[in-house]
Image (cartoon, rainbow, N blue to C red):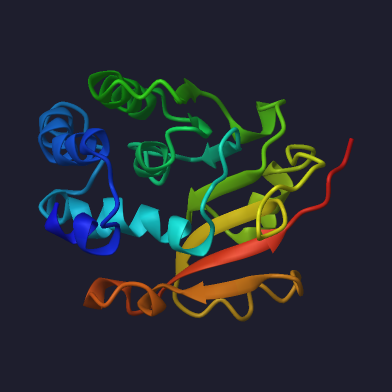
């Protein structure tokens, strides 16, 4: 938890309490439904919570923003972002129902009223959002296809509406088809070794009715 305060020193007492509860909640649920690998559960705050919050270092969400988390798994990056931005609304979807059960139970325990999670395929989501976030669920070509007609027309942020995608490694080839993509290296924000090759990719997407 110290590491979250290190990079986000202005958290409210409620936010600090919510972040502090994550470890016990995930350890409890992970013993029943495996949503985080055994080796990662002990590194929860660096490998999952802080990694998710890398998106916030690239773009802070304005009040009344709508954010879609595709392939959320156990609730990352959606749950940490929902804690950090209580005035924005987050919709988390995953095609695996038992993972969404964990997300809903964690969100309920934290009293996260700005978060909704459903067992749903990305293609079936009909709403429009300022940003669509995810942690490397598939290659970028397929991910962009899933996001069709899901972007709000009006942009209220520093970055244009679109995708904020957490990914690692060399993305040169994967992003050839997306010349407007911008890569933000997470070592610019976080000094821990885990983030050495980690990035946030922003791809602006046009509104399509």
Q: Quadrant of residue 80?
A: top left
Q: Is 102 left, or right, of 204 in this rendering?
A: left
43, above or below 176, in the image: above
Outermost residue, right side: 209
Q: Quadrant of residue 19?
A: top left
153 or 60: nearer the eye? 60
143, above or below 23, in the image: below
- Quarter holding the C terminus is top right
Give me the residue at 10% from left, 35% from top: 24
Q: Position of residue 138 (x, y in %)?
A: 54, 54
205, above or below 95, in the image: below
Q: Position of residue 150 (x, y in %)?
A: 73, 37
Q: Is 123 left, or right, of 169 in this rendering?
A: right
Total number of numbered labels? Answer: 0
Give me the residue at 26% from left, 72% from top: 194
Q: Quadrant of residue 121?
A: top right
């Amino acid at each position: 938890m110290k590491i979250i305060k290190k990079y986000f020193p202005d958290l409210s007492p409620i936010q600090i309490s919510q972040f502090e509860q994550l470890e016990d909640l995930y350890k409890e649920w992970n013993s029943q439904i495996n949503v985080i690998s055994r080796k990662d559960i002990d590194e929860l705050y660096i490998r999952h919570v802080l990694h998710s919050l890398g998106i916030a270092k690239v773009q802070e969400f304005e009040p009344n923003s709508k954010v879609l988390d595709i392939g959320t798994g156990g609730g990352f990056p959606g749950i940490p972002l929902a804690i950090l931005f209580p005035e924005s609304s987050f919709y988390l979807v995953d095609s695996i129902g038992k993972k969404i059960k964990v997300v809903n139970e964690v969100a309920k325990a934290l009293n996260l009223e700005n978060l909704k999670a459903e067992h749903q395929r990305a293609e079936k989501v009909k709403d429009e959002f300022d940003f669509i976030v995810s942690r490397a669920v598939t290659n970028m070509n397929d991910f962009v296809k899933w996001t069709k007609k899901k972007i709000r027309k009006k942009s209220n942020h520093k970055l244009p509406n679109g995708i904020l995608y957490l990914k690692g490694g060399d993305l040169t080839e994967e992003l050839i088809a997306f010349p407007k993509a911008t890569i933000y290296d997470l070592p610019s924000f976080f000094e821990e070794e885990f983030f050495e090759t980690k990035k946030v990719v922003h791809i602006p997407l046009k509104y399509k009715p």
